[in-house]
Image (cartoon, helix red, strand yellow):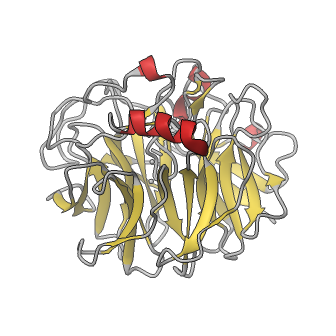
Amino acid sequence: MLRLRPAPRLRALAALALLPALACGGGEPAKKAEGAASATKDDGAKAAEAATPPEGGDAGEPAGKVKVGIEDASALIREGERHFAGLKQLTFGGENAEAYYSTDESKLILQSTREGRECDQIYTLSLADGATTLVSTGKGRTTCAYFLPGDAQIVYASTHAAADDCLPPPDRSHGYVWKLYDEFDIYVANADGSEPKVLSASPGYDAEATVSPQGDRIVFTSTRDGDPEIYTMALDGSDLKRLTNAPGYDGGAFFSPDGTKIVYRANHPEGEEELAKYEEIRKEGLVRPTRLEIFVMDHDGQNQRQITRNGRANFAPFYHPDGRRIIFASNMNDPLQRNFDLYMIGEDGEGLEQITFESSFDGFPMFSRDGKHLVFASNRGGAKRGDTNVFLAEWQD
């Protein structure tokens, strides 16, 4: 889930300010897409956040409440977006991204920087009325949340055990980079945020967890063996298996609808010079996300194959319910690498189609199980530059 943190922040270099550094789908989400040249929130690491309750959802929240509700946003459907029969806006202001359905599809869980906080916390959002509830501790920075089967529990990554604040941002002397904070561990908590407990921890970065639709495995990214690789584990954290082994970043993974395959994003250095540069910053917990390609593999790590080959920042891949197509975000059609749209491609790498045509940022897509709705994050219609909100589109093939 590499929230994935400002998700695509890539504007020419700074345009990278959108890429989800850690987003499950990306890293610090591409939320800051519009904000530009300065980089921030992912699918790598997000900005920083301030404190609230030690146990999740029920402590007092900071002042400056955000607007809550659900509004028709069909006027924001852009020319060429033929797959959108209707559009609703679910959040209003701030940075909101990586919104994923509950098992019963009555709620979403998302990461959001709002109400005076400096970095992301995790919230649930009711699809009945748009009401939100804080379910992370309010401390540290968080990323990549998901519902466990049955919706009684949630899983997310947080640094709150290491510090109440958001931790220092990445060193930009290396250019546009994501920080894979060693302080991130994966937690499981009750659906209301109470009783958070460590599910997976290591001396390195552990985050970007998502759950198989079959309800038996969690896939996540970890640097426990040095390199950022993809692993799976049982729902209780046992039966750990490493799936990837190539030098470079592998993350933002999601299972296919039948749980037999995994789609993910990767940046594998090419040639000795690239590898040397990668190793230099990896030792500082940094990765450079300006080139990410989409890959697919079997659920056990076998048959790894590259799906995109455009040399741009492709992230937040998610399977269509038909199990044959993959939707993802990319800046492939912007010469300046600033604008991210959604695209669909066959699992075989054929049939590429552009889905959205927003002039700033669209990312972090997730289909409902029946394929009738698509949740995604976008800068469209923002009240101010850099606002990233969650939208629900009525999908038509």
Residue 234 is situated, as x and y percent measured from the top left of the image, at 30, 77
Q: Position of residue 146 (x, y in %)?
A: 39, 60
Quadrant of res 382:
top right
Question: What residue is rendered at 30% in x and 57% in y?
Answer: 225
Q: Nearer the viewer, residue 282 or 347?
A: 282
Q: Where the C terminus falls, by quadrant?
A: bottom right
Is residue 176 visible in the rendered image? The answer is: yes
Instruction: Choose between 93 and 268: the one closer to the eye.
Output: 268
Closest to the observer, 73 or 316: 316
Which residue is depicted at the point 53% across and 77% down?
302
Q: Is residue 58 above or below residue 214?
A: above
Residue appearing at x 61%, y 61% in the figure: 295
Which one is in front, 178 or 127? 178
As drawn, 111 above or below 253: above
Side of 100 where 86 appears, left or right? right
Q: Position of residue 363 (x, y in %)?
A: 61, 45
Position of residue 294 measured from the top left corner of the image (x, y, whole percent): 63, 56
